[in-house]
Each structure stands twice: as C-alpha cells, then as structure tokens.
Image (tube, rainbow, N blue to C red):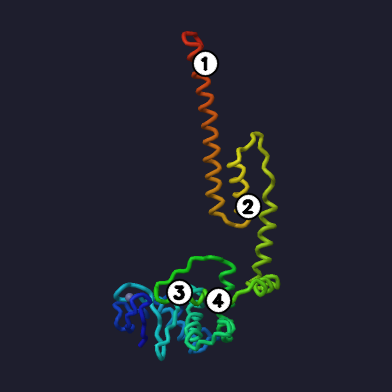
Amino acid sequence: MLNFKCKKCKSLFTDDQISVSPWKQIKSEKTKKDNESDAAFLLKLIEEATRNVRCPKCQSTVYLMGKDGFEMDVTSEPLVQFIKGLVDLHKNYKKENITPVSFVKYSEEAIDYAKEIIGHLMWKPGTLIYFEDSYLMEEAKSAIDSLWEDMNYEDLSNEMFSGGYGGLLVSIIGDYIERGMKLKPTFVSVKPDDIVSVYFQNAMECWLYGINSATLILCCSIIENLLKLETKIVQKAKSCMEKYREQTEGKKFIRAY
Ligand SMILES: [Zn+2]
C-alpha cells in the first residue's frame, strides 16, 4: 500500500482510497530489463504510479510518503525537486543555528544541491518556478535567499570559464558566432527614423542572443512604425492633392486622381 500527501491541501490518503487505481494507469513497459535490479524496477513503477495520483479533495499532485513522514517528490520538475532538497537542509541549518558557517558550506549535501540549482539557473536565470505547495514556496524563497548570499562572482566565473554548467559559455559563444554570421548588414535607401533604428538594432540583438519571442515583438513594432510613417507620407500627399484640387476646382483634370 502506498501513502500519499497532497501538495496543496496536505490531505493524507492511500492508493486504495483513490477511485481509479494509479497502478492501472501505468503506461511504461511492465517487464524488467535484464540489467535492472528488482529494487530499481519497483521504484520506477512506484514513481510512475505516484505521477498518476491526484488528491481526491483538490486534484493537486502529491508527495509519496516514506518512513518517518519523509516526503518524496517525484512529480515536480527537477529544479523544484532540488530546491525541495535544499529546503530540508535549510530548515536543519536554521534549527542548528550555526551562524559562523555559511549555509552552502554547511554540509556536502547542501553543496551538491546548490551546484545543481545554480547549474539550472545559469541556463535559465530568473526563471518562473511553479509550486503547488504554498508553504514550501515560502521556505524555498528563504533557502534560495540564503543560497544567494553565499554565491560569489569568482566561484561562478571560475566554474563558467572552466567549461562548467554543461559547457554554457561555449554554447553561448558558439550560438553567437553562428547567428552573427547570418546577420549581414541591411541596406536602406530611405533614412530610418530614430525609433525604427533603435527597434531594428534591438531586434537584431535579441535574435543574436536567441530571444526569439522578443525579436518577433520588435519586428511587429518596426512594421507598425513603418506603416505609421507610410500613413504620414500618404496623408501628406493627400493633403497636397486636396490643396491642389481646391486650387484647380472646375478644371478638367481634377478628377484624374
Ligand atoms: Zn488536496
């Protein structure tokens, strides 16, 4: 029998209290691979069953409960799972109140979690992180604040320049060169106004750095501004024609336009 705890409303329940058994919804191959141990195979099935479980009260995803109330999170994205691990250590750190030692250097485990979290965040700085569990979210903020206090530029840059964070630096430079090579200068015969010039340059830079959605939005703004410019030219031409029409009222060619 498996025990679960709702991430949101914290209800406790077992797999036989769910209307549709999570075991019946398992889609993966139910036979064990040759090189797979019995324990690894069983854990894989339990994790998959847990991913199928929703809280009967609020339909949120759940923690798998282990011995002594240990909450195992198998449904969140990896970054959230690492943050949850960091939160548990952060709680112990605060409880033990070892102020002279920094949080990250508090234990080998904290260093490992910090490495994983920073590695994820270096690829996606400032990313949105969704927590169903609002209590955990507050604790996560606090743990991340402590982690931030311990971060220093030198360690991060050494890691980055030595190929760390999954070769992020090489990847950025590689993408930059590849995209930069595709951006030939653009020749125009009409002098662009300041807004168009700025937006155009920003759009080029966004695309160069791989920010494709922002590039698209800027391109739309450029077109919008060009059309406004076009409208101004058309309106000016129309008003000139109107003036001309007034001046030539009664003459044969006035209906020519
Ligand atoms: Zn619930």
Tell me which label, 3 or 1, sits earlier in the chain: 3
The amino acid beneath tag 3 is Ser
What crowding class fits label 1: few (fewer than 14 Cα within 10 Å), some (14-19), or many (20 or more)?
A: few
Residue of label 1: 244
Q: Nearest the camera: 33 or 185?
A: 185
Picture coordinates of residue 41, whole percent (x, y): 48, 85
Tell me which label, 3 or 4, sits earlier in the chain: 3
Q: Quadrant of ligand 1?
A: bottom left
The amino acid beneath tag 2 is Glu
The amino acid beneath tag 1 is Tyr
For the residues carrying marks 3 and 4, which lies nearer the camera in this image? 4
Residue of label 4: 147
Tell me which label, 2 or 3, sits earlier in the chain: 3
For the residues carrying marks 4 and 2, which lies nearer the camera in this image? 4
**Mark 2 vs 1: CB contact within 8 A:** no
Residue of label 2: 205
Picture coordinates of residue 193, whole percent (x, y): 60, 38
Marks 2 and 1, how far apart at CA:
46 Å
